[in-house]
Image (tube, rainbow, N blue to C red):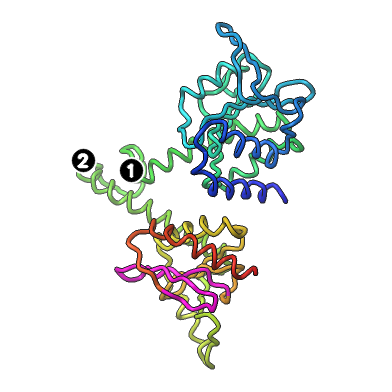
Amino acid sequence: MDFVERLEGLSKKLSQISPSLITEEATKNALVMPFLHSVLGYDVFDPKEVVPEFTADTGTKKGEKVDYALMSNGEVQILIECKKYGENLSAKHSGQLFRYFSVTNARLAILTNGAMYEFYTDLDAPNKMDEKPFLVLNLEDIDEHVVPEVKKLTKTSFDIDSIVDAAGELKYLNQIKKLLGVQFSTPEEDFVKFFASRVYDGVITAKVRAQFQEITEKALKQFLNDSINDRLKSAIGSSGSVKTVHPVDVKLESGEENNLDLEEAKIVTTEQEIEGFNIVKAIVRQKVSVERIVPRDTQSYFGVLLDDNNRRPICRLHFNAKQKYIGLFDDKKQETRHPIESLDDIFNFSEQLLDTAGFYDQ
């Protein structure tokens, strides 16, 4: 398996065993050690590579131990502090790791609860761990942009200088992304004023500012939605419009092909459909590779297909009316609609979705 497959495999395992992870030791054995071994490529049974309960005496405390130290040529490369799965990683935990960091030669540290992995270095001051991580990996929701950066930490690719060099950009990139997220959700006054001053020629009074607050919020949401739609269209290989999916195993009658362009022009992919697709993808990726799960929008429903093949439907999302439905398929490819009240209700059909995805590989 390649790096991505190993990472996704551990993510799948996490979703299956998470209810059983009730102690820190269980988290270490079931998640952290497999992450070090299978994902990063270290031999967890070789004390020359991985030292559990590594002693890191601080100035005032002796016998202080960090959960793991990753070694290379007798030198500490990465310190790892673990917490129980489900426990929030807090400033208290990073402060504990901060003390360990300052008394070793390590330039990298990882704080984890088995699902979340926070990566730290010493960008702000030499041999002093930064307060904020430069990279965060969430195994329960893997960000594709994070994967290449985590791969740099593998045993075969490890180069401390290149990692630290990249960390500077990553740290500020992630902070800017968070700030943008806040602004997209609730734009601050200065943010609104920035745009208003460039499109409005009059004096920006309190009334005008209040108007532009609402206008800016709408513009940001529409911009984000348009960007998602463009990416979705690109992902499914469309040039300018979303591909139309036709009923399973039904052939087009003569002359219908001429109407396809008109039909495609009427298709609008909504934000709810995209969110629903992401939920289905999160469920089905436990059974099949995420690259095989493909969206196809139509005028009447939003389809989710396996292998971009309309003869392999996973489900259909019927979100165009007030009452929403998810359409599920049996082994004869017959669709049954089930009403849902919210997008979270899709998770209630996880077993059926996984069975359908697995059926096509039999």
**CA gap, disc 1 to disc 2?**
18 Å
Q: Earlier in the sequence, mark 1 or mark 2?
A: 1
Q: Kindly report the secondary structure that dominates the magenta region of the rendered protein.
A: strand
Residue 86, above or below 80: below
Q: Was residue 245 drawn as part of the magenta stretch in this picture? A: no
Q: Residue furthest left?
A: 207
Q: Please report the bounds of the magenta region as a residue range.
A: 312-336
- Image spot of residue 283 (x, y percent): 51, 57
The residue beneath circle 1 is 186
The residue beneath circle 2 is 206
Q: Residue furthest bottom?
A: 254
Which sits in the foreground, 155 or 25? 25
Q: Residue at x 50, y 82 (%)?
A: 260
Quarter of the figure with residue 288: bottom right
Residue 196, above or below 125: below
- Image spot of residue 226 (x, y percent): 44, 59
Badge number at residue 297: none
In the visual, does 127 lie left or right of 138? Answer: right
In the visual, does 251 lie left or right of 275? Answer: right
Identify the amino acid type marked 2: Ala
